[in-house]
Amino acid sequence: MGRPLRVAVLCSLPLLAVLFGAAIFNPRGDYWKSVEPPKAQCEAYDSAQLHIQKVLTSAIYDQRKLDRLIREPQNTVSNLAYMTAGLAILLAGRRSASISLGLAGLFLGIGSGVYHASLLPEWRMLDILGVYAVLYGL
């Protein structure tokens, strides 16, 4: 296993560890703390409430979706594209700028994946930092 692949595997471990730990060590099923305040769009909204509510409040969330391990499955899984691109750049790149961009892509995929799985404000910063890291790398 080459160095970039080892780095990619090591970078993926935190996301897998968080999700695995949440699933195994929480028999009650309340995997995450309370959800962040509503934002402009969210996969975890209750579509019926979205049409009724005039203002975005926490009542707009679908409780069944908040009780899942992955609160926003589409947004979470879509981050695999960032991880795949980051890994491809790491495997193909020879310059330090390429390695940095590849690592930034992996960081974005992991950070954004954990954020969208949890919808916790603490993780939002990883999502935002990952976007900036990729943009800076480009």
Image: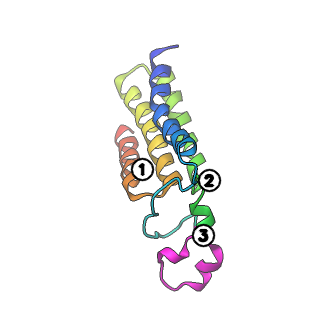
Q: Amino acid at mark 1?
A: Asp
Q: Is residue 49 above or below residue 130?
A: below
User: Residue 80 location in percent, x, y?
Assistant: 57, 40
Q: CA distance from mark 3 to mark 2?
A: 16 Å
Nearest the viewer among 125 and 104 is 125
Q: Amino acid at mark 3?
A: Asp
Question: Residue 40 — which label?
Answer: none
Outermost right residue: 48
Q: Amino acid at mark 2?
A: Gln
Q: Which region of the structure is painted magenta?
A: 45-62
**Quadrant where the C terminus lies?**
top left
Nearest the viewer among 96 and 126 is 126
Label 3 neighbourhood size at 10 Å, few (<14), some (14-19), many (20+)? some
Q: Is residue 74 above or below residue 1?
A: below
Nearest the viewer among 93 and 25 is 25
Question: Residue 74 — which label?
Answer: 2
- 3 or 1: mark nearer the eye: 3
- 3 or 2: mark nearer the eye: 3
- Judging by the rendered image, the residue that carries numbered circle 1 is 127
- Judging by the rendered image, the residue that carries numbered circle 3 is 62
Q: Report the residue at 52% width, 67% height from top.
A: 41
Residue 50 inside the magenta-drawn segment: yes
Q: Report the residue at 54% width, 65% height from top.
A: 42
Do the residues under discs 3 and 2 have CB atoms within 8 angstroms? Answer: no
